[in-house]
Amino acid sequence: MSSIVTHYRNMKLNIVIPTYNRADFLIRNLEILEEIIVRGKFTDEISIIVSENCSPDDTFKLVTAYKGHSQLQIELFRQTENIGLKANVLFVLGKAKAEYVMFLGDDDYISYEYLAACMLILRNDPETSYIVPNYVPVSIEDKIVSDSREPVGPVKMMAAGQKAILKYAWKAHQMSGLIFKTQGLFDEYNKYKVDNLYPYVFFAGMCALRGTTYQVSEFPVRVVQPIKKKDWGYGKDGLINDLFDNYRKLPISSGLRFKSEASLMFTQYWRLTMYSVHGQKAFWKAAWNIAFAKNASIWFTLFFPFMLVLIKLRRKFEA
């Protein structure tokens, strides 16, 4: 038992993959991970944790077979019933024992360059608490279909504090490639009673408060565009209420909470404007749901009409 404990203590990074009904994507992902982990000589520092959420396909069988001949350290769990996306994400986090944890979608792919850059940061700066990647949309054939989320550029660093939350926490709405310091995350999630589809924003906020944040934009994570309907939808408010649950639960000032809400709304205004395709009535109904979201601060509700004006001006300028 002591040798197992020592092994976990020496592990630098767990890559955790919650998966459901995407066997082909997942096996390809494991093949890519094996190639880059072996190439970087990271096999003693990185392990993979997969939670198969009672898929109707042969995911568990295929991963079990892959694990049998892989050079990777793979822990595979199978849920006896579908526990939902949120619970599966928390499950893999709860199984993480390494110093750091990376979340990865079963159909999103990291590169060797990104992994190597992250491992260099983790080795050189023990104060690292949060690493956020760049993203680029790709087709199922792995062809880039649009620009990356951020301009490609050098690594950026920001010291712990509320400024880091404002600048980088919202970027965690896309989970793949995010790296957090593991210690305390699971317990803090339960302590603050977080309950939404984007808990990574809460994790990012907590980590940004207690350690250094890095943004690695040079090697974007490849995000496969959905080829089938998602297992969840955007509801009646673009999932703004879910996102705002994180800011409501973070131990931050009311001023920073409002700034974070406003910044996210202005940056991701598509969460409102996407309802325009269903007509003006649908748009204004969504606007009402966002303005009076349960988890929105009173200041957000009061200033939302001004945000609408800014959003419309931005759309006009971008057009």
Image (cartoon, grey):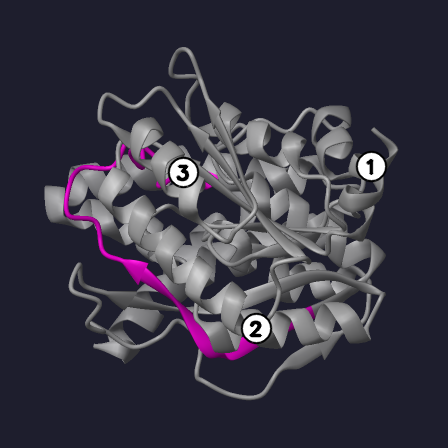
The question of residue 178 being in magenta is answered with no
Q: Which mark is residue 239?
A: 3
Q: For residue 185, which quarter of the picture? A: top right
Residue 238 lies in the magenta stretch: yes
The percent coordinates of residue 38 (x first, y second) are 52, 66
Percent coordinates x, y for residue 140 in the rendering: 17, 59
Tell me how far mark 3 sits from mark 1, CA to CA. 40 Å
Q: Name which residue type carries label 3.
A: Leu
Specify start and end residues of the magenta stretch as a single range: 214-240
Q: Secondary structure at mark 1?
A: helix
Front in this rendered view, residue 235 or 223: 223
Closest to the observer: 79 or 296?
79
Indicate the secondary structure of the residue bearing disc 3: loop
Q: Residue at x 73, y 45 (%)?
A: 182
**Quarter of the image where the N terminus is located:** top right
Query: Residue at the location (31% across, 28% down)?
Result: 61
| Amino acid found under the numbered disc labelled 2 | Gly
Q: Quadrant of the C terminus?
A: bottom left
Query: In the displayed structure, would residue 189 be above or below residue 140?
Result: above
Query: Which comes sooner in the sequence, label 2 or label 3?
Result: 2
The mark nearer the N terminus, 1 or 2, is: 1
The percent coordinates of residue 282 (x first, y second) are: 20, 37
Distance Cα–Cα, label 1 vs label 2: 24 Å
